[in-house]
Amino acid sequence: MDTPNFSFELFPPRTPESAAKLPSVIQKLAAVSPSYFSVTHGACGSDQNGTYDTLLSVVEQTGIETAPHLTCVGSTRANIAAQLDRYREAGVKRIVALRGDLPATAMSASAPGELHYANELVSFIREQHGDYFRIEVAAYPEMHPQAANPAADFENFCRKVEAGADGAITQLFYNADCYFDFVERCDKAGIRIPIVPGVMPITGYANTLRFCTNCGADLPRWMRLRLEQLQHDKDALVDFGIVVLTRLCESLLRNGAPGLHFYTINQSEPSLRLVESLALAVMA
Ligand SMILES: Cc1cc2nc3c(=O)[nH]c(=O)nc-3n(C[C@H](O)[C@H](O)[C@H](O)COP(=O)(O)OP(=O)(O)OC[C@H]3O[C@@H](n4cnc5c(N)ncnc54)[C@H](O)[C@@H]3O)c2cc1C
C-alpha cells in the first residue's frame, strides 16, 4: 500500500491561551508532511477574519497548502465574492465549501442568506472563478441529520458534485461499513471524485458522545460502553481510542479510501499518535 495522504483540520483559536498554543500544534503536525491543512469557518459568516488570519499563519509557518472552509448560510453573494477574492490574492488554491450549521432559530426553516445550500455555493465559486479553486465538499455516509431521508441526502450530494466539487470529506464515523456503502452508492451514480474519510480521534467519553449526537454519527454500543467504563482513566481511554481508530483507518485505507482527513480539534498528539500507529500498521 502507498503511503496514505493525510490532511489536518484546525479551527481559529478562540482565546489568547489557545492562540498562544497553536503555533506549536501546527509545527508538530507539519512535521509529518500532511498534504494540506484546512481551517474551519464559523457559520453565518462569523469569524471570517479568524479563518483568514489562521490560514495565513499556517502558510507562513509551514509553507504547506492550507484551505479555508467557506460557509454560505446567512451570507450574501457580495460577501462571499469578496472572501473568494481575498483568498485568491493570498494564493489559496483549495476551498472546503459548506452551507454551515444553521443558527438554532432557523433549524426548521430554510437556510437564511442568499445561497441556501452548499451546491449553490459550489456553483457560485465556479461562476466567479472557473476552475481556479479545487473545491472540497462535505459528505454524510450516515445521512446529514436535517435531511428528509438517505435518498434525498444522497441526491443533494450528487448536486454538489454536478455543481463542480473536485473532492469530498466525510463527516466523522466509527463504523467503516457506512463509508463503504456510501462509496458504493457513489460508484453506482457514476461519481468518481475522491471521498476522503473524516477521522475524529477519541480524547474523552463525554465529548465523543456529544460529537456523535450533534452530527448524527452512530457510536457503536460496544465502543460507548468501553468509553464509559474508561472515562476516569484518560490514558487508558486514549490508548483504547488509538487501537480502535487504527483498525478503522487501516480497514478504510486497505479497501480503497484515498486518504484521511483528521479533525484535530487543535491538538497535535491525538492525531499524531494515530498517524504513527497507522504508519506502522499499514507497513506491516
Ligand atoms: C468536512 C466537514 C467540514 C465542516 N466544516 C465546517 C465549518 O468550517 N463551519 C461550519 O459551520 N460547519 C462545518 N461543517 C458542518 C456543516 O456545515 C454542517 O453539517 C451543515 O449543517 C451542512 O453543511 P453542508 O455543506 O453539508 O450542507 P448541504 O450540502 O447544503 O446540506 C445541508 C442539508 O440540506 C439538505 N439539502 C441540500 N440541498 C437541498 C435542497 N435543494 N432542498 C432541500 N434540502 C436540501 C441536505 O440533504 C442536508 O440535510 C463541516 C462538516 C464537514 C463534514
Image (cartoon, helix red, strand yellow):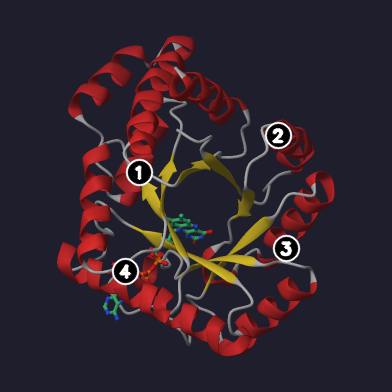
Left or right of 219 on screen, residue 74: right
Q: Amino acid at mark 4?
A: Phe
The first of marks 4 and 2 along the sequence is: 2
Q: Residues within 10 Å of mark 3 (few under 14, many from 20)?
A: many
- Foreground residue, 159 or 256? 256
The residue where tag 4 is placed is 157
User: Which mark is first along the chain, 3 or 1?
Assistant: 3
Instruction: Count up the numbered dots.
Output: 4
Quadrant assignment, res 18: top right
Whole-percent x, y for residue 246 in the image: 41, 25
Residue 164 in percent (x, y) is at 45, 77
Q: Earlier in the sequence, mark 1 or mark 4?
A: 4
The answer to whether the beta carbon of the residue marked 4 is less than 8 Å from any atom of ligand 1 is yes
Among the two numbered marks 2 and 3 on one chain, the one whose residue lies closer to the N terminus: 2
* Residue 280 located left or right of residue 54: left
Q: Which residue is mark 2?
A: 25
Amino acid type of disc 2?
Val
Separation of disc 4 and disc 3 at Cα? Answer: 27 Å
Residue 219 can be seen in this image:
yes
Task: Dividing the image into four quarters, tell me where ligand 1 lies.
Answer: bottom left
Answer above or below: position of 9 versus 87: above
Residue bearing the label numbered 3 = 52
Which numbered disc, 1 or 2, marks the residue that appears first in the sequence? Answer: 2
Q: Residues within 10 Å of mark 4 (few under 14, many from 20)?
A: many
- Compared to 261, does 268 lie above or below? above
According to the picture, the residue beneath numbered tag 1 turns out to be 256
Quarter the C terminus occupies: top left
